[in-house]
């Protein structure tokens, strides 16, 4: 059960473990579940101390960010997947390497918006990249955050598992170099795309429910 925002602060900030990949729970030393308000405050302090996350809430300059991080864990992970597909497509990934749109609605959304000039990808997109669109999408979200809302970067990074080869307890862990990179990004357009993808996902869910 998701908690209500604290004084206008979204749970993504106050309860980051709900969005974090399961491997981060292992590094914390316990699986974090539902708590009463007092215990939750203690867990919050322990979690951010363990991983070096920013503690003080400062709202973003663009309020669309708050709308994005108010998404449920499954929805935000889905949006990241769609952004990853989009980045890989714009980087030259053949459509045939992606999932079939009828099977993966997030890939369908990426196909729908791939003509939007929101980012530029340089380098070579490989077949292995196409198999991990969510990881690529978290990279897009982090590139957005670094420009538009740096405070959220560390929490976004925890959407994917840390590098298993590095035992350090930090979210800024070195990753293996990938053969492609985001060379330019328009954060405003990407935020608009996130909103459109969230609405598209809601519409798809509603359509399935009425069949």
Image (cartoon, rainbow, N blue to C red):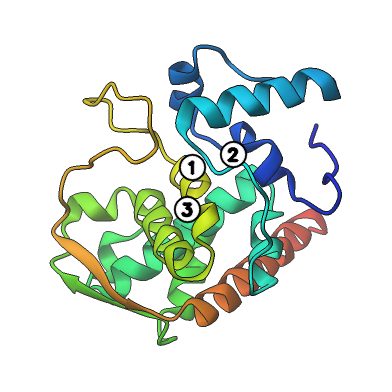
Residue under label 3: 153
Q: Are marks 2 and 3 in contact (CB under 8 Å)?
A: no
Picture residue at 83% right of the left edge, 59% below the top: 210
Q: Are marks 2 and 1 in contact (CB under 8 Å)?
A: yes
User: In this rendering, would 120 be left or right of 74?
Assistant: left
Q: Quadrant of residue 89?
A: bottom left
Front residue (pair 62, 109): 62
Residue 121 seen in render: yes
At 73% across and 66% down in the image, what residue appears? 203
Q: Which residue is mark 2?
A: 19
Image coordinates for residue 47, horizontal then vertical, percent: 57, 26
Rendering quarter of residue 17:
top right
Q: In this rendering, would 162 be left or right of 72?
A: left
Whether 40 is drawn above or below 13: the answer is above
List the residue tagged with mark 1.
Answer: 159
The residue positioned farthest toward the top in the image shown: 29
Q: Is residue 3 left or right of residue 103?
A: right
Disc 2 to disc 1, how far (Cα)? 6 Å
Tag 3's secondary structure? helix
């Amino acid at each position: 059960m998701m908690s209500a925002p604290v004084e206008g602060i979204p749970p993504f900030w106050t309860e980051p473990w709900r969005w974090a990949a399961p491997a981060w729970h292992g590094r914390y030393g316990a699986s974090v579940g539902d708590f009463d308000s007092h215990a939750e405050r203690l867990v919050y302090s322990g979690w951010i101390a363990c991983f070096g996350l920013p503690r003080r809430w400062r709202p973003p300059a663009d309020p669309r960010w708050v709308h994005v991080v108010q998404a449920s864990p499954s929805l935000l992970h889905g949006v990241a997947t769609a952004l990853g597909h989009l980045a890989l497509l714009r980087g030259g990934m053949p459509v045939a390497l992606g999932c079939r749109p009828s099977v993966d609605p997030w890939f369908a959304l990426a196909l729908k918006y791939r003509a939007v000039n929101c980012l530029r990808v340089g380098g070579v997109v490989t077949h292995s990249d196409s198999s991990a669109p969510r990881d690529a999408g978290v990279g897009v979200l982090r590139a957005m955050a670094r420009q538009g809302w740096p405070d959220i970067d560390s929490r976004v990074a925890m959407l994917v598992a840390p590098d298993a080869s590095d035992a350090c307890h930090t979210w800024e862990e070195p990753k293996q170099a990938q053969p492609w990179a985001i060379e330019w990004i328009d954060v405003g357009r990407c935020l608009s795309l996130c909103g459109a993808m969230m609405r598209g996902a809601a519409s798809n869910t509603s359509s399935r429910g009425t069949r």
